[in-house]
Amino acid sequence: MFSLRTNWQLTPNALTRAIQAAQSSGQKIFDLTVSNPSEAGIRPDSEPVLAALANPKAMRYDPQPRGLLEARQAVCRYYRESHEADLDPECLFLTTSTSEAYSYVFRLLCDHGDEILVPKPSYPLFDFLADLSDVKLVPYPLLYDHGWQIDFDSLENAATSRTRAVILVHPNNPTGSYVSATESAALNAFCRDHGLTLIADEVFLDYSHDGTPRRSFITNKETLTFTLSGISKISALPQMKLAWIATSGPSEMVEEAGARLEIIADTYLSMNAPVQLAAPVLLGQRKKIQPVLLDRLHANLTELDTQLASHPSCTRLQIDGGWYVILRVPVIETDEDLAIRLLKKGSVSVHPGHFYDFPGEGHLVLSLISEPSEFREGVARVLEIVA
């Protein structure tokens, strides 16, 4: 009755069952996995946001496959102001989420069974997006040695005649590592040699921990590139559902990709008018919310380092950007068993490393946007139990 592409394991795993049991018992849980800023006490100003959504122009239906020009121009202003990068609004396609953006790009590039190279560790959502598009994901590893680097030997070995693109997450989630200029040049050469495209996920681009802006892949002209982002992280407004695909690269490739993407977008016309018309205001909220988020990231990271100084058996891995940090712990059990033990014994919720496809045990992933008091107590409980 159902398709094979949705033949997922639907039975909750042991950690999910433990979380459900803890929640149903009413116990206080110190959540170090929170990814929604509004759940961590960080919210943009409601008055201008709600006022912008009440635009009378929204009562007129004006379907535009690429998105309303006013909204695309607002995205272009964001790149110009935040990244000193010029973007033609005709190279933009608005979507309701980066997940939808991925589905558009996968459909554009891949036939059934074609392959996409994806970094490992990385976010588990890719597996579901690939399944729904009948695409096969082939991992290439990120290696850690005083920072994260792409393993180009493994990347080369992973490419086959069915490979169509390479996904980059810039900065990666959860490793917090940006793609360096040297790596970018090597990736462009790799794609040219194999006839591949780049898919750059930049949802956390603005959150560099040292305050130095990182180059966006919208400026990449060497190979056909699709850059994905949205206001979910830029303005801490995931509920407003505004994201985009920016195309760049050789002009002829960009033109043909745009023509094909326009038909895909025109088939669905998923963007709603109120959010598109509110785009200038929604993107403008980043100027107030990003400093608050960056202060939260710095405060929690400082707190973690302070507590780790008294627990030499545990360390954290280097991060350069994003909202997460990786805690390296002694391997005495699986990461999932440790996460369950932390939940049952310490009432602390963390992500085990295997959730992000870490190749070995001994990794916990913590959110840095948790409320400071909750983060402080949660980390103290984690370190006490692990020690």
Image (spheres, grey):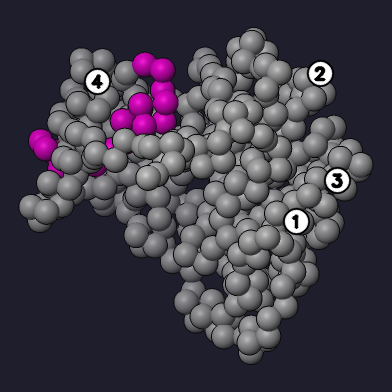
Front-most of residues 126 and 368:
126
Mark closer to the chain start, 3 or 1: 3
Label 4: few (<14), some (14–19) or many (≥20) C-alpha neighbours in 10 Å: some
Q: Mark 4 or 1, which is nearer the eye? A: 1
Residue numbers of the magenta segment: 344-360
The reply to whether the C-beta atoms of the residues labelled 4 and 3 are less than 8 Å apart is no
Distance between the alpha carbons at the discs numbered 3 and 1: 11 Å
Report the residue marked by disc 1: 263
Mark closer to the chain start, 4 or 2: 2
Q: Name which residue type carries label 4.
A: Thr
Q: Which mark is residue 256?
A: 3
For the N terminus, the quadrant is top left
Front-most of residues 359 and 197:
197
Distance between the alpha carbons at the discs numbered 3 and 2: 20 Å
Report the residue marked by disc 2: 193
Image quadrant of residue 110? top right
SS at mark 2 in the image: helix
